[in-house]
Amino acid sequence: MIRILSFNIHGGYDRNGIRDLKRIHAMMQELDIDIGVFQEMETRASRGGALDDIEVLAGPERPHRLPGLAMKEGEGWYGNLIVSRYPLLRSLVHNLGSARSFEPRNAVDALSQTPLGYLRIIGTHLSLTPWERWSEMHNLVTLMDGVEEKEKNPLLLMGDINEWQPRSRLLNHLDKILKPVPCGKSFPSSFPLFRLDRVWHDRCHFPVSARTLADKKSRHFSDHLPVLITLG
């Protein structure tokens, strides 16, 4: 069995505005998380970040990392991140935006060697505006199909999709390409009303399930609820 955590961590700030990545690391330890897929990872000094934040979040238990730098400030950055117990044999960062984008967006794309075999994991965080989301997802699907691999490995796509409408063109399109994994409402964490954080899979020969973590502690860590994905 493999356990993956997909989580928009809001720069590491909880609902009281206190930043503490050690709490998220402790949560991963408690849940026995093998792979963490994070959105809104923040290491910029002007936003309270530090260069060792990835180490604090991942810990020595997850030595394999794929940072997806969407915005940079000196040596600090903001964007997506994958941390893993298992080796990442191939690591890519896909630029999803355009010259008209309000905020740079990307996707982290890793091929991991796990006890269940090779597993392709993609994490992303799409824009707030509908036309940007559609463009970004179209770009992502094109890039996903364009990656050359010797074999078609099981694939998991996850992250903060920022789609408020349950019957949107974007979700309908993705649901035709990949198999959606139900995981519940995730935003806002204090009283979840919307399924902004989602999971899809393809070619998985093992069971895949997902659920939002809505206990009191998990509700406090961010403005989104974390999503726990179980494979096998």
Image (tube, rainbow, N blue to C red):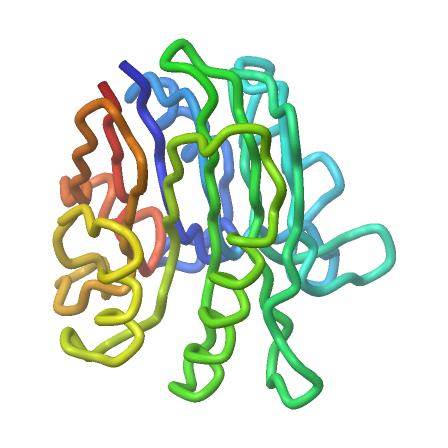
The x, y position of residue 158, in whole percent, is: 37, 49
**Residue at horizontal 30 percent and vertical 58 percent from the top:** 177
Relative to the observer, which residue lies in front, 223 or 159?
Answer: 159
Q: Quadrant of residue 227?
A: top left
Q: Is residue 65 left or right of residue 187?
A: right
The x, y position of residue 1, in whole percent, is: 27, 14
Relative to the observer, which residue lies in front, 216 or 173?
Answer: 173
**Residue at horizontal 17 percent and vertical 34 percent from the top:** 209
Q: Is residue 49 above or below residue 230?
A: below
Q: Is residue 48 above or below residue 208?
A: below
Relative to the observer, which residue lies in front, 47 or 153?
Answer: 153
Q: Is residue 71 above or below residue 45?
A: below
The x, y position of residue 131, in whole percent, is: 44, 88
Q: Farthest residue toward the front?
A: 150
Q: Quadrant of residue 16?
A: bottom left
Q: Farthest residue toward the right?
A: 74
Q: Is residue 22 left or right of residue 28?
A: right
**Residue at horizontal 38 percent and vertical 86 percent from the top:** 130
**Residue at horizontal 48 percent and vertical 45 percent from the top:** 122
Quadrant into which the C terminus falls:
top left
